[in-house]
Image (cartoon, helix red, strand yellow):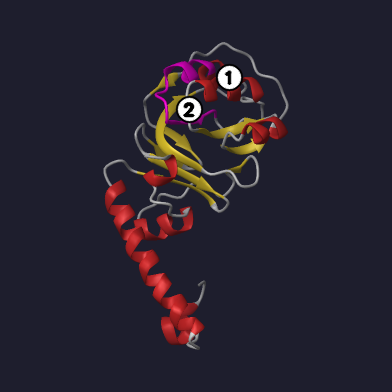
Amino acid sequence: MSANDLARGHSTATLSEASRLPVALSPEIRSLWDGARLCGPAFTVQGAGGDNLALHHAVLQAPPGSVLVADVGGARYGHWGEILTVAAQHRGIAGLLIDGGVRDVTETEKLGFPVFSRNNAIHGTRKDFRGVFGRPVKVGGLTVNTGDLVIGDADGVVALPASDTERILDRADARVAHEKELMKQLREGRSTLDLYGGFEAAGR
């Protein structure tokens, strides 16, 4: 099963609305490069701001196909760059979600490795803290557990609880089917106010 199949091809916006749960990360967490798509089960990493030793260990410990989800406190340091990207790809890691800074944007894009971060920064890091793995971490204002399904696209990032993932995906399927019918009616001349009912259309 491809990474995209894990989310049944759904966008983060669809999944967020279909979930009826607080699954969306802070909008400050964005893709490092345009067109990046992140999808895979989380492998959580508790690191330290300005220190990237935990990420080096995580690359060795994370199962293939997983997304590294790292809390480094939003620190503006280059915790991740080209060298770790190459190492992660060799290990079969699907991507990185980090509440903190990264660097080497151009090189990471050329490698096609999806990274979603709070900021870009070029300050170097120390290597003192080995990290804690597999425990809940706080990323983008949301608690993420190992095994949660992480999806990132141009709109943002969601983390679906492992226990609710299938139910959320089923709701997303139904939502997409409903919206296809709405699109059909709009092309036939109906208005959004007709379809949503007066002020219920606000925000659509």
Mark 2 or mark 1: whose residue is earlier in sequence: 1
Q: Residue at x 73, y 27 (%)?
A: 122
Question: Which residue is farthest front?
Answer: 1
Q: Does residue 40 appear left or right of residue 162 in this picture?
A: right
Q: Residue 54, relative to residue 114: is it above or below?
A: above
Number of marks drawn: 2
In x, y percent, where is residue 75? 62, 30
Q: Residue 64 falls in which quadrant of the image?
A: top left
Q: Which range of residues does the magenta coloring cover?
A: 56-72
Q: Amino acid at mark 1?
A: Asn
In x, y percent, where is residue 154? 58, 51
Find numbered disc 1 in the image and state the secondary structure of the residue it sits on.
Answer: loop
Q: Which dot marks residue 52? A: 1
Q: Is residue 74 visible?
A: no
Q: Amino acid at mark 2?
A: Ile
Does the magenta-highlighted stretch encompass residue 69? yes
Q: CA distance from mark 2 to mark 1?
A: 17 Å
Question: Which residue is farthest top?
Answer: 128
Name the residue beneath numbered marker 2: 93
Q: Dot 1 surroundings within 10 Å: few (below 14), some, or many (20 or more)?
A: many
In x, y percent, where is residue 6? 37, 44
Q: Is residue 38 visible?
A: yes
Q: Which dot marks residue 9? A: none
Q: Residue at x 41, y 29 (%)?
A: 43
Q: Residue 87 falls in which quadrant of the image?
A: top right
Q: Nearer the viewer, mark 2 or mark 1?
A: 2
